[in-house]
Image (cartoon, helix red, strand yellow):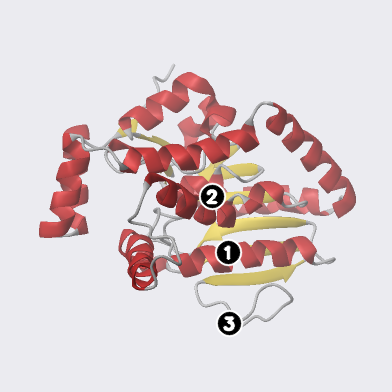
């Protein structure tokens, strides 16, 4: 499928469709569990602006193709891409920053990446995250920026990279689930299932996997009947309230603290980097996560 519009031109890693006042943006790399590469992030950013600008769109659905919503950042792609950028910048030094340079350089690169995803918050139109399978690390950076999160009962939501790799560069956790749950999830890197995510406020609603589309489509249908100018007024006043509670400033601090976390020389981060260098990504992830078992939070049932 090809698409060419005002903002989005011939995407390769996302799909863009409009029908009955609803734009569907699909992360389309199911073989890589929709991991976020620099190209994916740029195409997603452009697709979101395309939907926001179009007069035949009132609501946006953000989803992932295949079994997963998004399993996180492509460690081989994002970091390799930043390394390549850093090497290119080094060749042109002292003209450009290097992502392997100072703390401030790292923070600068994190802020540039963040700008591609926080655009969800700034759109005038509502965005529904349709979450199935894994919604991890960078996947949560996307989903929690959306206005609504609807997930399958067994979806897996979390930021396991917080165990050794850094802190979320986008931070809407505290606004969804409060300080204790935000700390519980981030300080352990544990994940929570969709049905329990609803209980703590990370998601609006969950449904069995075979009913997820119906639930998402019904909400989108209901929203789509309201004029986009009025939807914009509702969204922006609620988001201004979040800004009054520090949400905008916190995103900058989140990016800076992720850069700060990258400077850690603690044993777990040091071991992860050594495993990456010697054995590759799969071994590094296995060793990082082994002490945590399946790493799933299970709420007690009545």
Q: In this view of the protein, which residue sits in the foreground, 271 or 93?
A: 93
Helix, strand or loop at mark 2: helix
What residue would you read off at disc 3? 1
What residue would you read off at disc 1? 44
What residue would you read off at disc 2? 142
Query: Which quadrant of the rendered structure holds the N terminus?
Result: bottom right
- Disc number for residue 22: none
Q: Residue at x 64, y 37 (%)?
A: 248
Q: Position of residue 104 (x, y in %)?
A: 43, 46
**Does 18 appear above or below 182?**
below
Query: Which quadrant of the rendered structure holds the C terminus?
Result: top left
Q: Which residue is drawn at 43% across and 65% down?
A: 37
* In contact (CB < 8 Å): disc 3 and disc 2: no
Q: How far apart are marks 3 and 2 (CA)?
A: 24 Å
Q: Position of residue 207 (x, y in %)?
A: 54, 42
Closer mark to the observer between disc 3 and disc 1: 1
Q: How far apart are marks 3 and 1 (CA)?
A: 16 Å
Name, please, the residue furthest toward the top: 302
Left or right of 161 on screen, residue 201: right
Mark closest to the chain's N terminus, 3 or 1: 3
Label total for image: 3
* Residue 108 seen anywhere in this rendered image of the structure: yes
**Does 48 appear above or below 171?**
below
Left or right of 289 on screen, residue 166: right
């Amino acid at each position: 499928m090809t698409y060419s519009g005002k903002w989005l031109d011939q995407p390769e890693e996302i799909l863009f469709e409009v029908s009955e006042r609803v734009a569907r943006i699909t992360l389309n790399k199911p073989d890589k569990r929709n991991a976020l590469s620099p190209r994916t992030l740029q195409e997603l950013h452009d697709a979101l602006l395309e939907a926001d600008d179009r007069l035949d769109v009132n609501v946006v659905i953000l989803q992932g193709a295949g079994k997963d919503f998004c399993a996180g950042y492509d460690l081989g792609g994002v970091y390799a891409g930043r390394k390549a950028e850093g090497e290119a910048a080094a060749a042109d030094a002292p003209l450009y920053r290097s992502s392997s340079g100072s703390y401030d350089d790292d923070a600068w690169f994190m802020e540039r990446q963040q700008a591609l995803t926080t655009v969800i918050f700034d759109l005038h139109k509502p965005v529904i995250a349709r979450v199935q399978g894994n919604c991890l690390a960078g996947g949560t950076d996307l989903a929690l920026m959306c206005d609504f999160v609807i997930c399958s009962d067994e979806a897996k939501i979390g930021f396991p990279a917080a165990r050794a790799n850094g802190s979320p560069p986008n931070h809407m956790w505290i606004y969804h689930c409060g300080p204790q749950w935000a700390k519980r999830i981030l300080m352990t890197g544990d994940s929570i299932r969709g049905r329990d995510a609803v209980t703590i406020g990370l998601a609006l609603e969950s449904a069995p996997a075979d009913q997820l589309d119906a639930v998402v489509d019904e909400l989108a249908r209901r929203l789509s009947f309201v004029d986009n100018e009025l939807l914009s007024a509702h969204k922006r006043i609620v988001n201004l309230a979040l800004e009054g509670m520090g949400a905008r400033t916190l995103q900058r601090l989140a990016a800076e603290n992720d850069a700060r976390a990258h400077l850690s020389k603690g044993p777990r981060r040091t071991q992860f980097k050594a495993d990456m260098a010697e054995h590759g990504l799969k071994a590094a992830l296995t060793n990082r996560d082994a002490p945590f078992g399946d790493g799933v939070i299970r709420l007690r049932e009545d």
